[in-house]
Image: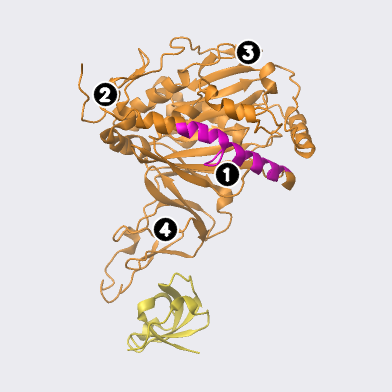
Amino acid sequence: MAMNGTNGYRPGLVDLSTGQISREIFVNDDIYAQEQERVFARSWLFVGHESQIPNPGDFFVSRMGEESVILCRDRAGAVHVFLNSCRHRGMKVCRYDDGNTTVFTCPYHGWSYGTDGALVGVPYFREAYHSALDKSKWGLVEVAQLACYKGTVWANWDAGAPPFLEYLGEFRRFLDLILDGWDGREGQAELLGGVQKWLIPCNWKFPAENFSGDSYHNISHRSVDLVGVGPSGKSRRDYNELNVARKLHVAIADRGHQTITYLLPKDHQPQPAYQNSPEVAEYFRHCEEERRKRPGANARLIGAPGEIFPNVALLPRQPRTIAVWHPKSAHQTEVWRFFFVDRDAPQAVKNFLRDYYIRYSGPAGMTEQDDMENWNYAHAASRGVIARRHPYTYEMGLGHAVEDYEFEGFRMPGRVIDITSIQASEEPMRNLYGRWAQFMEADSWDELMSWRRNSPVQAEAAK
Amino acid sequence: MSYPINVRDLAAGTTVVLLSGAEAEIVDNPKDGVWLFARYLKSPGDPALVGQEEMIFAQDVVDTRP
């Protein structure tokens, strides 16, 4: 029997031809260290929402991979993301979660930075430095690329990465499902309350895999379904659309993004939902009516769990939330969960949704607790020397995805498996880990943009 | 030696006396306990500073004038 390797990543740990993936990629400390450089320092990462920093001087301290970053709006109104580390000796220059400031001052030696990142204050600049320090070279480290998309803020440390929308590719429509208003108007999402943050003892890829579209684990949530935490008092969500919709696994193969989605038939009529509150039910009925007057590309789609590579999970509908799986170590993840509502929704609707959201998700949410128990124990039970010799299987539905899926005139992009009757596949997970392996093996973004090689026109446009 | 002054408590308009003997009027206080934004009123050692607005380091502040 083969002994476990003690080194880091090597080709073959992710074997998509057989659907087998080594447990090493979850529990190996060397691989974890490598993926900080190869995955998190090169990917577009979710940093926050513009509604968190509406005014000049507003800031929100976020994370990119293991590192603390400051999302802020400078005095001129421009949005920035900076590494939260003083250029002199590395101390955090901001130790609050959020707030408003004119300067970020390091408490160690007193270096001070403007909200545009410029070094503005150096103690004893004239006396000790003899006015010789070139302050313009010692501002806060700023991300190489920043993108604000329908209120969300994304950042990337790699100047060679493609622009954010190119990185999303065809997956953009699934992100739109969470950011657009339920009535179909663009970019109506507003952050509800604060950000829930907590630690879980497992590798970040366990939740990333789950939210990629694991419909196989519904048995875990059986007790929640029986309790009936859903917004109509039954199950955990409103499921009436499932009676007529196609339930699909969609994997955008060259990007590493994947999701479950429900594709409604033509001329579908709204189904009863949010029946625990007449006011909320009426709000969503009205929104559904309005949505049908704006037949955009997403009019027939209902969002469900999905994942933007590498660590951003989407739940566009019930509850409407984005989660970020921040890596802390190979064996620990810090979860940040952001909840969203329509900006113009009545306060009573927002209150109802808040109660439902936290009943479902977050450290106290009943469904999230089910998931965490699985991830935490699966991780712990995979760390031992014997356990690590035995790979996981991801062969469910291997070879059954199609690239030309169409239903009643709606052509779905990506690799698709229709799971309406078969219930589950592992195509989304294979997509996630296939992309992860590409990142671990590629030396630059040039090797990671296969679509540009296939489409010289797009490559030229991207320049 | 005088006691240290808590610069967080100083309001805009207050005049501070600096270690160098210069005096400056606070124009803004970020209340980080480290810096003040102030305009020089007097600067015997470097008269060119008078009228200039600069960040003043807390440890340079030795006294205040009402």
Q: Earlier in the sequence, mark 4 or mark 3?
A: 4
> Is residue A61 part of the magenta span, yes or no?
no
Q: Residues within 10 Å of mark 2 (few under 14, many from 20)?
A: few
Q: Which mark is drawn over residue A66?
A: none
Q: Which residue is mark 4?
A: A117
**Is A109 in front, or is A206?**
A206
Q: Which residue is mark 1?
A: A151
- Asked if badges 4 and 1 are on one and the same chain, I answer yes
Q: Is residue A14 above or below residue B30?
A: above
Q: Which residue is mark 3?
A: A407
Colour of chain B in the image: yellow
The secondary structure type at the circle numbered 3 is: strand
Q: Nearer the viewer, mark 2 or mark 3?
A: 2
**Is A130 in front, or is A234?**
A234
Q: Nearer the viewer, mark 4 or mark 3?
A: 3
Q: Residue at x 38, y 86 (%)?
A: B22
Residue lying furthest top: A400
Give the residues in magenta.
A349-373
Determine the chain carrying the residue at label 2.
Answer: A
Q: Which residue is mark 2?
A: A386
Question: Is residue A148 visible to the viewer in this orientation of the structure?
Answer: no
